[in-house]
Image (tube, rainbow, N blue to C red):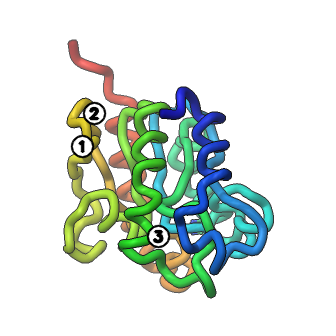
Amino acid sequence: AAGDIEALKAAIEAFEGCPLRFEGAAHQAVFYRGDPAAPLMIVGEGPGAEEDARGQPFVGRAGQLLDRMLAAAGLADRVFITNTVFWRPPGNRAPTPAEQAVCAPFVERAIELVNPKMLLVLGASSAKAVLKKDEGILSLRGRWHEWRSHSGNLELPVMPTLHPAFLLRQPVAKKKVWSDLLTVTERLDRPDRP
Ligand code: URA
């Protein structure tokens, strides 16, 4: 029911239904950074230690790489960044489908409130949660998919791509993500047809 992003942030901070809050998080809920009116919404997996400490998504090493790539693609000031879960999973494991399902109504409300033109999802577990498809990220990435809200009122194009933490381990895969970012920029900059 949250009427704006700050109300949604307060609702997330008060929410006790996600077990990660009591298992992995040492400090706080991590909801978003960026522009609440951005044309591009980025959905990562879940906060890590740095994010848990600072209360913002993607502020650790993976986030710094993400920021450099977004800047190079001309997307730096055009994003709202969040995750599929809002509390750090213990030991930085991937969030489970059950943990993601508990947080999903908040993610969906964030999408409705930000009302972006498209979504960029980072990593295998985010792509699975957002697209509800059981394919691997390497086959999903680089192509447009469709996301639809529960109410059916909102449909958005979704680009899945590789997670920046994976790129830190496999720098040779950066060219795939670069290509996906350029595909996103091209679509964002395309004039809306009447
Ligand atoms: N990895 C993620 O998926 N999200 C973050 O916020 C940080 C690292």
Circle nearer the N terminus (1, 2): 1
Name the element at disc 3: loop
Residue 107 is marked as none
Which of 47 and 183 lies nearest the eye of the viewer? 47
Circle nearer the N terminus (3, 1): 1
Residue type beneath disc 2: Leu
Q: Is mark 3 within 8 Å of ligand 1?
A: yes
Is residue 50 visible in the rendered image? The answer is: yes
Residue ID for mark 2: 154
The residue located at (42%, 77%) in the rendering is 96
Residue 1 placement (x, y as % from top left): 48, 33
User: Looking at the image, which residue sits at the far front?
Assistant: 16
Image quarter for ligand 1 equals bottom right
Pointer 1 local density, CA inside 10 Å: few below 14, some 14–19, many at least 20: some
The residue located at (53%, 33%) in the rendering is 2
Q: Is residue 102 left or right of residue 142?
A: right
Distance from Cα at disc 1 to Cα at disc 2: 6 Å
Name the element at disc 1: strand
Whether residue 178 is situated above or below residue 157 in the rendered picture:
below
Residue 163 is marked as 3
How many numbered marks, from 0 up?
A: 3
The residue located at (24%, 62%) in the rendering is 132
Residue 37 placement (x, y as % from top left): 54, 29
Residue ID for mark 1: 148
Circle nearer the N terminus (3, 2): 2
Distance from Cα at disc 3 to Cα at disc 1: 22 Å
Residue type beneath disc 1: Arg
The residue located at (32%, 28%) in the rendering is 190
